Amino acid sequence: MAGQTVFVVDESMPEQIRQLGAKIEQLSRELEKHRREASKGEAYEYGFMRLPQILKIFQVSKPTWWRWVSEGIAPKGVKLSKSITVWRVEDVRAFAEKVAVEGLEGVRDV
């Protein structure tokens, strides 16, 4: 019987199968939870970010963010429509690195 797989079935198999099914279900729920969390706030390497994602990162108000943009402190966004502005992930990352190095002194309203 070379090359064939032989399965041995014993009385504990139904319980093992039930446990495996439960474990698969648990892992599926955890994976879906991580996907939802990633879509809420995590930035990807490339692409665009909406304002709520940016505000979570920098912990500032909308008016402060828009003031930073108008003063050239924060990166300018890309207008997708009259009411929708997005920012390039790479621009936001570069700004975050600049803030990490230089600090927010003189940038953030306290």
Image (tube, grey):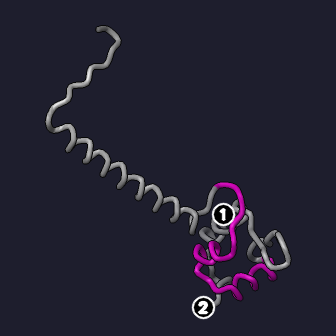
Residue identifier under label 2: 110
Q: Residue furthest bottom?
A: 110
Which label sits in the foreground, 2 or 1? Answer: 1
Q: Name the residue under label 1.
A: 93
Name the amino acid type tagged 1.
Answer: Arg
Above or below, comparing residue 14 to residue 8 in the picture: below
Residue occupying image coordinates x 60% and y 76%: 58
On the image, the x and y values in percent for residue 92 come to 69, 66
The magenta stretch spans which residues?
45-72
Give the numbered dot on residue 19.
Answer: none
Quadrant for residue 43, please give it. Answer: bottom right
Circle 2: element type = loop
Query: Which quadrant does the C terminus fall into?
Result: bottom right
Crowd class of label 2 (few under 14; some 14 to 19; many from 20; radius 10 Å): few
Residue at far right of view: 82
Disc 2/disc 1 C-alpha distance (Å): 22 Å
Residue in the foreground of this view, choosing between 78 and 29: 29
SS at badge 1 = helix
